[in-house]
Image (cartoon, coloured by chain):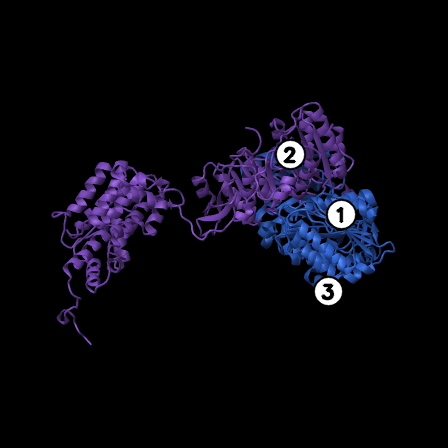
Amino acid sequence: MTGLFNKKSQAIFWNNNTEAIQRMLDYDYTVGREIPSVAALVIAAGARKFELFFFGSEQIRIPVYQNTQQAVENHPEARVFLNFASFRTAYEVTVDALKLKHFKIIMITAEGIPERMARMINVEARKQHITLIGPASVGGITAGAFRIANIGGTLENIIHSKLHRSGSCGLVTRSGGLFNELANIIAQNSDGIAEGIAIGGDRFVGTTFVDYLLLMEKDPKIKYMLMLGEVGGTDEYKVIEAVKEGLITKPIIAWCIGTIAENFSGSVQFGHAGASANSNMETARAKNTALKEAGFIVPDTFNGLPDMIQKTFATLKKEGIIEPIVEPEVRELPVAKRKNKNFICTISDDRGDEATYAGIPISAVATPDTGYNIGDVVSLLWFKKRYPKWATDFFETVLKTVADHGPAVSGAHNAKVTARAGKSVVESLVTGLLTIGPRFGGAIDNAAKYFKFAQDNNMTAQEFVAYMKNQAIPIPGIGHRIKSLKNPDKRVEGLKNYATRFFPQHQLLDYALQVEQETTSKKDTLILNVDGTIGILMVDMWRSLGYAETEIDEFISGGTLNAFFILGRSIGFIGHILDEKRLEMPMYRHPFDDILYDE
Amino acid sequence: MAQKPVREFFVKQLFAKEWDRYFTRLNYQFKSVLITPETQIEGILKANTWLQKDNLVVKPDMLFGKRGINNLVLYKNKKAGDVVWDFAKKWMKEKSKNETVLKSGQKGLLTHYIVEPFVPHEQEDEYYIAATSQGLEDVLYLSAAGGIDIESGWDEKVTTVFIALDDDEKKIKDKILKGLPKDVPTAKKNIFADFATQFYFFFRDMHFAYLELNPFVIKGKDLFLLDAVARMDDTAEFVMKEKWGAVEFPASFGMNKKIPEVEAIEKADHISGSSLKLSILNKKGRIWTLVAGGGASVVYADTIADLAGVSELANYGEYSGGPTAEETRFYAATVFDLMTREKNPNGKILIIGGAIANFTDVAKTFEGIVLAMKEYKDQLKKNKVKIYVRRGGPNYQEGLKNIKKTADELGLYIEVYGPETHVTEIVRLSVG
């Protein structure tokens, strides 16, 4: 593959530079990319999991991560790193990215990174054969394929400068503003550019003129190059060497700006940090002379460039090296159709002929012949994909196990009292449900949380028991009113048997059983109870399904486990409510003699 | 933000501050003072009693080299090493009176001197060392024959050691040991190699871009820095604040002294995330520029020099990186203020130029220029300023429309062009 980017290239963008990112996506849409050029954002202090952008008229979510490593783990296909950190942090951000040994192209926009730090980054980038654009660069573009951030300016300018489709010139400049200017000049005087880079204005930039020009030499789309150098540094001489050695054979139009500098005594520092001559060799005039002597196409002044481009282009066209371009149709950006959405839904869709659950039409899951059970529907709507049968069967086992625990438990009692007060099914149900919390039903969540925490931190069963005692927290999921090892809870036995037979792994259950050994040695009713077993097996299930530990932690903290209890127990509550309706029991009043009045 | 030369005094002060951390095997007595027009002589004499006891050497400390060749090193009255304070004081006063013209053609007023004790020594005790940053390497130059003649016969006298940025300490030491000049006396080889290694670490850690000691003298366990030249990487200031202390980056000798207006722009540039640069080249120049972009501003300056002659160009400057309207207003007002101080019978030209911006909002930055135009409308009119505008980029149509409208309403001469016109065409149009 030649060229820096193609239509499939994707980037991880460090910092939430919304305007630049939207410009990239607008370009993507205009040139007909199928996937957005930004795969993910890294926002160090980002609290949100995604940011919203427009791709054409559609609003899309781009995932946000708190560090580059996480972004890379989740988006391994994104090999371009766009570092938009400030000059104070750009070095650390780049070093972190380099450590991952993942990126092919790294671009740094910050201006004013200490030179030594910029050079260190460069050394490491070269070791890894990474193209390092910048520091102090506005980026680069492969016309019609991928654009970095703001390069090329507005979309209107992009199209005017024919940056939306490939031409035949390779453009390399230091300056970002002049890059734009030259892209425009090239478009007006030839068929535009195929690829262009603003290498950056600092004295020590990563990949430099000669590296890019060598790449362009190999790129069949590019028939000639334009290099705009500057006073300061000696990079242009390396290009001369490469041409002399025959490594570059395509014609190069070249000019170095800053010819005015030698008119001043002392050295003049221009706007770019690199633009100051430390020796005669570094002056613009010396470089222009050397370029001309080496056979480059060199005008008399910067303003002679348009003419040189026109002539070079005409010659190459005449020789048949450049073929005519059929101008592609430009996809118009539907800006007027853009509307910010207040709600986002990622689980179902009712806009088509038939509503879907995670993309599957309801009719394809509803009837028994579809092979989908209620466990499958839960997995589609709660986890956005169909889990394997052993997992959906586990869901159903859980739902059945927790459906009811008799009329005496507080939730059922409340539901019954409410029903007897003449309230409707829904009112009675929510009264029961509102009882669910840390004491009623909450053990499932907490068992998962604490047992996982203990195992994640490599505590032995003994250490865990001691730790919880220290914290003065009874171990959630341990203990039963009457059941013991000798008189086991059959529901727990059923769940354990199911897991050992069907789960691909059940490490946390095994760990919990070690803990049970510890606790029952103190008191024989301190067994792993049904809440604990469910919570722990859910963790084992997600681990078996390949979820990351962080994702599992989010499931737990988001209350997903409790949701199974709520769903299952609703069946029981409704049963009790309907029971009351049938019995037509009167309004309940608690007897005086059951209350201790102690004023 | 870039490599900036610093005074010899600053370099020696930094050596002194860091000495014990780097150069444990040698002693360095920091005996240097910087005399400026603001120096309280009494105080400095009190703090440095050696000034009135020792014989002295005095040199201008104003970034230019070859002071010996320019007869600007005071070390003798009747014979070498007999300069006393009163004589030195008289000499400085004398030298500061009139403009000094250097052999290089640079000219200016001498204002800053470094005063140190005279160090009697033999020519053979003089050594040379320098370090510089070059792309992926640092380069160390070593010689046993320091002094003003170092450049003649460089290849015979000086050895070169290339140090890769990721070389470890051992490798660096080995390279320096191998690269030691052959003519360093055997007895001093060890101490020279050790000094050279520590010198390199000092150079590296302190974010120097260039550091030269020519010559330095080793006498027993004592080291004397007779001369020092250095450029610092000023972008490292935010990490080096504590080590460097208050560092001054003076304008090079021969450049006009920075006027307060330019210093104010520098200060604004320092605070801002955007870039604001201004230097006055010739305050009597007829053509003033207000150009956006580090690259475009250079192209405008080149073109003005080509078409009108460099003497016509009054300033070099640029604003970029999306400055706010207020920052642009301040910047433009400063330029308007400076350009309307002295009338020219032929009137003046103001070039408001720029390439096609990538992300800078042209309408917003022009808003700032428009405000400044309103502020300075009378002065601009009185000075017969003709304004030529060329710019492209986000919202350029609105920006150009507003600036034209304002100038027309204020009765100022203006011509306005967009990206369809070649970037420097307005220079040609303005000078006819």
The subunit carrying tag 1 is B
Q: Quadrant of the N terminus of chain A?
A: top right
Q: Quadrant of the C terminus of chain A?
A: bottom left
Disc 3 residue crowd, few under 14, some 14–19, many 20+, Cα 10 Å: few
Farthest right residue in view = B345
Task: Measuring from the top left, give residue A568's x and y in whole percent.
Answer: 24, 50
- Colour assignment, chain A: purple
Farthest left residue in view = A486
Image quadrant in which you'd find residue A368: top left
Task: Measuring from the top left, give residue A430's x and y in whole percent.
Answer: 27, 58
- Provide the residue designation for mark 3: B42
Which residue corresponds to the image point at 84% horizontal and 53% vertical from the top-left? B99
Farthest bottom residue in view = A599
- Provide the residue designation for mark 1: B64
SS at mark 1 in the image = loop
Which residue corresponds to the image point at 56% horizontal and 46% vertical from the top-left? A20
Q: Amino acid at mark 2?
A: Ile
The residue nearer to you, when weighing B1 against A508, is A508
Same chain for the residues under marks 1 and 2 in the image: no
Relative height, residue A582 to residue A200 (above, below): below
Q: Amino acid at mark 3?
A: Glu
Task: Measuring from the top left, give residue A533's x and y in whole percent.
Answer: 23, 47
The residue nearer to you, when weighing A497 against A229, is A497
Q: Amino acid at mark 1?
A: Phe
Which chain is drawn using blue? B
Q: Which mark is residue A193?
A: 2
